[in-house]
Image (spheres, rainbow, N blue to C red):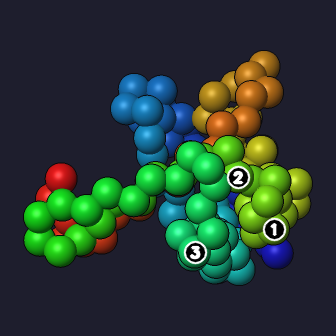
Amino acid sequence: MMSSSSVSRDQVSSFLRDGAVPLRGVFSPQWVEAIRAGIDRSLREPSDFGQRLTGGGGGAYFNDYCNWRKIPEFRDLVFNSPAAKVAGMLIGEGDRSWGQHIPTHDNCTHL
């Protein structure tokens, strides 16, 4: 699965300033679909850390982490996607930590 996997200086600056940055085009459509499939699997098969909270408006908030080893799509992302390279570009090559956290919420959720 190919991607451009390049990050601009402006994106790095935005990430360092804001803690998050859109990465449009960095991951190929195949990787985006694999990540979606992994999130869907995590929603169906949450880890012991998974939480589903409901709020007003009929929506829900789901939170899970530490399950990249059990979700094949996430394991593939860790070892075979440009994610490590992109993370290194954003946070610097010296940081080798991996933290995977999946917060999701329905559009109509008000918690």
Instruction: Residue at 70%, 52% (x, y): give it.
Output: 67
Mark 2 Cα-neighbour bin, 10 Å: few <14, some 14–19, many ≥20: many
Name which residue type carries label 3. Arg
Q: Earlier in the sequence, mark 3 or mark 1?
A: 3
Q: Nearer the viewer, residue 1 or 41?
A: 41
Mark 3 Cα-neighbour bin, 10 Å: few <14, some 14–19, many ≥20: few
Residue 91 vs residue 72: left or right? Answer: left
Q: Residue furthest front?
A: 48
x, y percent for residue 37: 64, 78
Name which residue type carries label 1. Pro
Instruction: Residue at 70%, 25% (x, y): give it.
Output: 92
Inter-mark Cα distance, 2 to 3: 13 Å
Residue 72's disc is 1
Inter-mark Cα distance, 3 to 1: 14 Å
- Residue 15 seen anywhere in this rendered image of the structure: yes
Mark 1 Cα-neighbour bin, 10 Å: few <14, some 14–19, many ≥20: some
Looking at the picture, does residue 37 appear above or below residue 62?
below
Instruction: Residue at 62%, 50% (x, y): give it.
Output: 48
Looking at the picture, does residue 58 appear above or below residue 80?
below
Inter-mark Cα distance, 2 to 1: 10 Å
Q: Residue furthest top?
A: 94
Residue bearing the label numbered 3: 44
- Residue 93 seen anywhere in this rendered image of the structure: no
Residue 38 vs residue 77: left or right? Answer: left
Q: Nearer the viewer, residue 96 or 49?
A: 49
Query: Considering the numbered disc 1 on the image, is that residue within a helix, a strand or a loop?
Result: helix
Q: Nearer the viewer, residue 45 or 20?
A: 45
Query: Considering the numbered disc 2 on the image, is that residue within a helix, a strand or a loop?
Result: loop
Residue bearing the label numbered 2: 67
